[in-house]
Amino acid sequence: MSKNEIGSLLDFPRASETATHERRGGSGSNSRPPAQGEIGFVGLGQMGTAMAANLASAGRRVIAYVRRPEQQGKLAALGLKPTTNIADLFDCEIVISMLPDDAAVREIVFGREAVGLDGLAQGLRPGAIHLSMSTISTAAAADLASEHALNSQGYVAAPVFGNPDAAKARQLYIVAAGAPADVERCRPFLDDLGQRTFVVGSDPTQANLIKLLGNMMTATALEMLGEIVAVFRKRNLDAAPFLDILTSTMFGGRAHKIYSAKILAERYAPGFRLPLALKDVRLALAEADSAGVPMPSVEVVRDRMLTGIAHGYGKAAGKTVASAMRRKKKGTLRSGKGGKGGKVTSRKQAIAIGLSEARQKGAKVPKKKAA
């Protein structure tokens, strides 16, 4: 799908259209050099922390906004300037957000009056840019862009393809959209974060639609990989030759190669928490529904994720199960109370032990129903 084919989902004013005449002309934003001052960063999870650290290591001065004071020491050690006061970001020319969902980004932009939290739209100065790298809905992106434009600020959507490991290695692929002058001002920072940036137009919603639908291609590929490997294992066969043939010929993309290798090696540690993956699936299905397009394969993935969460494969349980699988592979996982029984060789038993251990640690894992 080309950038021209995607089209504009929603029409809204942009900062470059609503600001002063100087910003429209050759001596305005089109000729302004990239911002060289401090960069604000909001959303210091696994992805955000890796990205902010890369900016700092590239020589950028990064103010990192966090809500919990106990996070500040770790961030300072990475070369960031942590703060619990979002107003410390208001003088930045560019503020980057890497947040989990629509609600979190809306709160940062619009603020939360009940607790006296000012938002970026109210606090940033005219001409500043909000570089939103979160995976959010096109409706949210349109609302945020419109709000920033009303305050003569720029808004660039630049969601990324890649996991936390890719973020650390600066191997992200970035999809950017916004007013051309604003995108160019952000480009040096995007170059610090990823291996390639695709600029897809002036409408920020285009970037978010591409990201959501791209995630669905990955999700359905994972579903098929899981189903295929299950067939081989049920027949007591090695799936490695099959996957080697297919990933060396017709299915040589990164998703097929990376995740088939992880499945074969039983490396199930989640790089992306299941509830967040489900959030993306639901957003993509909502986009398809608004366009009147059925997506039955994505609905299968949604149902699979819901089942996984119902069986306890959330954040804590996922890590514990992955640990049990690693111990099984090493031959150190034991059955019985206190791990004093025999060596575990069954994948099913290893998963059951992992879920049991997660439950003991306080994770909300449903107990297996009696037969």
Image (spheres, rainbow, N blue to C red):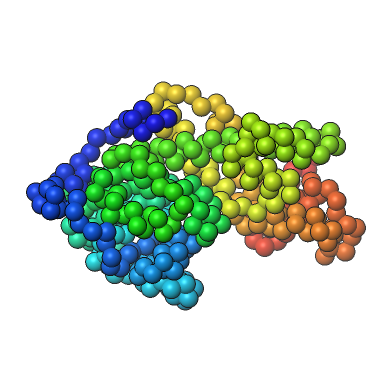
Q: Residue furthest right?
A: 342
For this view, does 10 lie left or right of residue 247? left
Nearest the eye: 112 or 198: 198
Q: Check the image and report above or below for 281 versus 355.
A: above
Taking depth in this image into account, of 104 and 145 the one nearest to the observer is: 145
Q: In which quarter of the image is residue 293?
A: top left
User: Does residue 190 sit above or below 236 in this rendering?
Assistant: below
User: Which residue is drawn at the image coordinates 53% and 54% (left, top)?
Assistant: 166
- x and y percent of residue 340 in the render? 88, 64
The residue at the point 66 percent across, 33 percent down is: 249
Measured as percent of width and height from the top left, residue 190 is found at 38, 54
Against 263, residue 69 (above or below) is: below
Quadrant in the picture for the N terminus: top left
Write down the quadrant of residue 62 in the picture: bottom left
- Taking the image as shown, residue 177 lies to the left or right of residue 12, namely right
Q: In which quarter of the image is residue 12?
A: top left
Residue 101 in the image: x percent, y percent?
42, 49
Residue 196 placement (x, y as % from top left): 44, 49
